[in-house]
Image: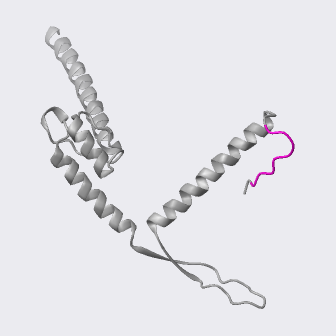
Amino acid sequence: ARFLATSRASAASLVMLLRRSELLLRGAASARRRGVAHKAGPAVQRLITQHGLHGAPIEASGPRGTITPADVVAASRIKAAEDEKARTPVRVSVLPFETYMCEAPSVEVTTNRTEMLAYYTQMYTMRRLELGADALYKSKHIKGFCHLYDG
C-alpha cells in the first residue's frame, strides 16, 4: 500500500512536471512566432534595426537563446523573399459598370499585396479617426455638427 501511494504521488508530480514543461515550450514557441527576441546584444539590435526586422520572427540559435548576426541575416533573407512575393501582381475581376455617354472602365484591375495593404492601412486609419471624432462630438468637445461617414 505504501509503494502504491508513493508511485501515485510520483506519477502525479510527473504529470504536473510534463504539463509545466509543455506550457513552457508552447510559450517559447509562441514567443518565437511573435518575433520576440529573448536576448540580443547592442550590435545585433543595430543589425535588426538596419534590416527593418522589428516584429519579424527571428530564430535564436546562439547560446542560451541569444540572437546572433547569422540569425538576423537569415531572417533578412526570409523577409526579402516575402517582400518579393508581396510585389507580384494580382489580377482582380470586378463587376461591369453601367455607364451613360462615357467609356466603361476596365473590369480587370492589376495590383499587388503591398499596395492593397497600404490601402487597408489608410482605410483603417481614417475609420479610427472617425471613431475618435464621434467620441469627441458626443462628449461636447466638437461644437456644431460633425458629419461622419459610418459606411
Image quarter for residue 76? Answer: bottom left
Image position of 20 (left or right of 114): left
Q: Residue at x 51, y 60 (%)?
A: 118
Percent position of residue 98, x then y: 73, 85
Asked if residue 30 is positioned above or below residue 82 in the image, the reply reads: above
Residue found 24% across the figure and 46% down from its top: 47
The N terminus sits in image quarter: top left
| Display coloring | one colour
- Give coordinates of residue 37: x percent, y percent: 28, 37
In the picture, measured across the screen, residue 70 lies left or right of residue 26, that is left
- Can residue 51 be found in the magenta stretch? no
Q: Is residue 15 left or right of residue 110?
A: left
144 in the magenta segment: yes
Of helix, strand and loop, which mostly describes the magenta segment? Answer: loop
In the rendered picture of this protein, how many numbered marks are placed on residues? 0
Farthest residue to the right: give it. 144
Q: Which residue occupies the foreground of this view, 135 or 59?
A: 135
Above or below: residue 122 compared with residue 26: below
Residue closest to the eye, 41 or 4: 41
Side of 33 relative to 64 (left or right):
right
Which residues are the magenta region? 142-149
User: Which residue shows up at 59% across the image and 53% down it?
Assistant: 124
- The picture quadrant where one finds residue 17 is top left
> Residue 151, how many percent across, how many down?
72, 57
